[in-house]
Image (cartoon, grey):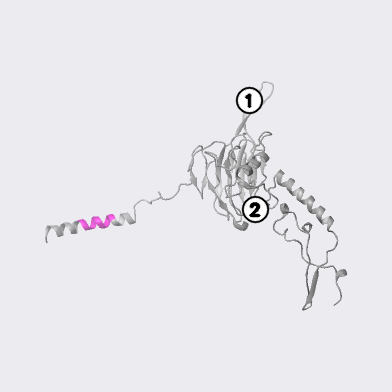
Amino acid sequence: MKYAAALSLAVAPLAIAKAVNNVYPAQKRSSHLKEISGAAGVGESVNIIEGLELGSATQVIVIWANPGNNAQTTTLHEQVTVTQTVTAGAEATASATVAAMATHTVVVGGAAGLVYTPSEIQANVGDMVIFEFMSANHTATQSTFATPCKLMEGGMDSGFQPNKNNTVDPPPKVAMQVMTTDPLWFYCRQSGHCGKGMTFSINPTAEKTQAIFQAMAIAQNGTGAGSAITGNATATAAESAATSTAAAAADAAATSAISMGSGMVEGGACVCAVQCSTGSFPVVAAQGIGAFGGFAGSLPASMMEAV
């Protein structure tokens, strides 16, 4: 046997072994997976779980997230135990005790419209805030008071949490812990929602209120004020609705008499038409599902003529 052929036969087992090792490595490869447990400490910025941004600011700490439908909850940070110093007794002895921590549930979207319910809360340091995401696909994104619809640098972002027609049950949830008494501002990052006033605040002040924050969001990013159809009517929209209601009422009063129309009987059924005044329809600000298009056609028996 020639030397080259013998060398090839000797090297072949090594090449085969290397190929097998590449396909079935001795250690499991996991670099392509995103680390979840212990993914980041406080102050680190990491993107995980469908765009959820933990944020690098220390005003809030994202504690856990759950995509809903009885899925497993992912713990992102350990909840911080907050203590407070209590001074008591004649000698003013100070001692540290665990502070009482409340849990605030905030419903995002859903049947109420493009709103957070409630739209504002007062929270102490250590309190938990749990966002419950209802239809259709919203976020809870941290911003600043000056720019309501822009992600704050280092701010937290829940990422989009889809829940079409509220079919995800239980709904997706993201929990965070408040670590400051300063005002905190949030908005929905879904296209157009913030511009319609979908905002939320924690610890707003008399100078910086939730109403002002919402109005700034609409002024900077919207095409008009929120209304009853979106479930977040602002003061401007409410005034407009009141004006429209008054005008409609006056018009309805002026045309309260029965308006005679024309009709005919076909196959035992009455087919008729009548022109309605604007007062017969709900005002624009109050229109919505099940509340538009006038009223169902019907005639009292006293108006029916014998055929």
Q: Nearer the viewer, residue 1 or 187?
A: 187
Q: CB under 8 Å between callouts 1 and 2?
A: no
**What kind of residue is marked 1?**
Ala
Secondary structure that dominates the magenta span:
helix
Q: Nearer the viewer, residue 93 or 293?
A: 293
Relative placement, left or right, of 247 versus 163 is right
x and y percentages locating residue 84 in the rendered image: 62, 31
Q: Is residue 241 above or below residue 179?
A: below
Q: Which residues are magenta?
A: 11-18
Relative placement, left or right, of 29 versus 96 is left
Q: Which residue is mark 2?
A: 110
Label 2 environment density (alpha carbons within 10 Å; few <14, some 14–19, many ≥20): many
**What kind of residue is marked 2?**
Gly
- Please name the residue shown 22% across and 58% down the image: 12
Depth check, mark 1 against mark 2: the one in front is 2
Q: Which residue is mark 1?
A: 94
Q: Is residue 14 magenta?
A: yes
